[in-house]
Amino acid sequence: MHAPALLPPRTPSQTPEKKGWDPRRSGSEAGPYRTRAPRSGWWPEGGDGAGLAETPKGAPGSPHQILAPECLRASGKMAARGLGRSLGRLLGSLSWRSGQPVRPLRGVSAPAAAAAQPGSYQTQIAQAAREPAAFWGQLARDMLVWDIPYHTVWDCDFSSGKIGWFLGGQLNVSVNCLDQHVRKSPESVALIWERDEPGTEVRITYRELLETTCRLANTLKRHGIRRGDRVAIYMPVSPLAVAAMLACARVGAVHTVVFAGFSAESLAGRINDAKCKVVITFNQGLRGGRVVELKKIVDEAVKHCPTIQHVLVAHRTDNKVHMGRLDIPLEQEMAKEDTVCAPESMSSEDMLFLLYTSGSTGTPKGLVHTQAGYLLYAAVTHRWENQSTMRPGSGSTRWWGTADARWWTPGGKQGNVVEGGDVSGALCLSQAWPGMARTIYGDHQRFLEAYFKPYPGYYFTGDGAYRTKGGYYQITGRMDDVINISGHRLGTAEIEDSMASHPAVAETAVIGYPHDIKGEAAFAFIVLKDNAGDPDLVVKEVRSAVANKIAKYAVPDQILVVKRLPKTRSGKVMRRLLRKIITGRVQDLGDTTTLEDPHVIMEILKVYQKYKDKQTAAQ
């Protein structure tokens, strides 16, 4: 945690050249999911377009300043998934096995609760900024179970994109998430799964979850999965999905969770990029009473995935599905395995999981997250965000996660720091934090270009932000689009903010497109509020607002009123799709599976065609 800071505005010429999981919408299972939070709980981070770090969205701001919070106050939006019908029967048959040996706890020097409250929030911020090694080092010693203690808290250099935390240390994530709780209270409920079928729930104890995890881990080992191998998890919300992630961590394999609503093409793309050896899936999924044919999607995907050696198929329904030469019935194989699996001792910076995001180009990028830093950051942020409702005596011991399994739901050159509130700019971070991504899998240069080159010495989040008078940060939108209009370089977020200042405008999105005279021109899409009145009048007033707030040359050449914008499930506007629509490249949209609703593309296409026809008729 570091004290927030601001860097001053820069001129456009300094801009680098650039060319609630809602089960009804984003999960493959419906119904809420609740879990009692583990003391040092770990759950996988966000999914396409998403991340662990979060700040409130809100007020507009200019993208020509750097907002550089030296500490990111993050909230871990973390969730797990649920358990199949056949696996429920399997767990019932396992419940008599209560002799699970528990790994002894080492390296715990003080109660974790004390580490979570070293002083007031402002005191913690000051300490983190002044002594980051002491701050994070103490938390790591107190909150994590180590096999071998670390010798160096951090070794980070933003100029080269080098990030390392708790060097020399070794641990196992699944031990931190399971074994220590089984040792203390094995029959405590770890997960409560509210299934798609109304009025039903499944409760899983820590002992049962550990036994299931070990059986699955042994199954993976029997089928050739070793330390460092990659495993794709394509499953609906289920405790078995949680066990699958923990099983990979137990044997030292790297997992990548793929949203169980993605197409075969998107699944194959992620499998091939990660070079996965195994896919874990269900025969089918249930979502709002509708059957989702997961196994059929996997069958189509693996036709184009030469690295896949096995497909482990669990059963959410009793319906039979085709089983081919690669397919293995998971429950049957798990029933043969022991409930004990020795955990692999992993180095702090070994890869834990790959988080694929859609990327601004449509090519998914696999962000690499590692063992100890991610584990600690997830545990710390989860506790601090929920300490008021989950502390002993509060009357609540449950945490309700509403995201799918992939969610768990920083501009200018270097300059002087500008203090104060009511200021806007580009959201940057001047120091590293344990839970940040380490690289883009297989493409470290892309990682450097995206996050460290725009503003040397800072990590650039890609977002614009507004800092209130009270010191809170509000995200105002992405800043990765810059338009060069007749030699004037403008961030699209700046134009969007100017248009959004009109009281009738609900949302905006601005993109650049080729122009014969200007080189580039701005095309704006706006969504109006229900009581907006005459759309033509609003458009006229919006043009005036941009001219007054920025300049006449910044006024978009074209403004199209639409009912909604193409967004990912995390709320990110996919501007590249808008650019393809207006440039006539709709046959090459790229990866669209992250869209909340793919039908929005046809809606906008129809409106745009009417707009073009009207322009043609007027000429």
Image (cartoon, rainbow, N blue to C red):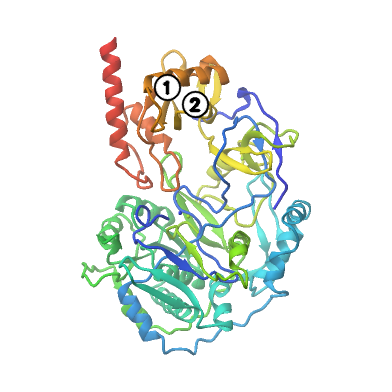
Percent coordinates x, y for residue 340 in the rendering: 48, 83
Side of 587 relative to 476 (left or right): left
Percent coordinates x, y for residue 5 in the rendering: 71, 41
Q: Nearer the viewer, residue 41 or 107?
A: 41
Neighbour class for label 2 at 10 Å: few (<14), some, many (≥20)? Answer: some
**Disc 2 or 1, which lies upstream in sequence?**
2
Q: In which image quadrant can residue 109 be found?
A: bottom right
Percent coordinates x, y for residue 570 in the rendering: 45, 48
Label placed on residue 538: 1
Q: Which residue is mark 2?
A: 502
Q: Is residue 508 visible?
A: no
- The amino acid at mark 2 is His
Tag 2, which secondary structure? Answer: loop
How many numbered discs? Answer: 2
Label placed on residue 318: none
> If the image is split into quadrants, where does the C terminus sit?
top left
Image: 187 above or below 313:
below
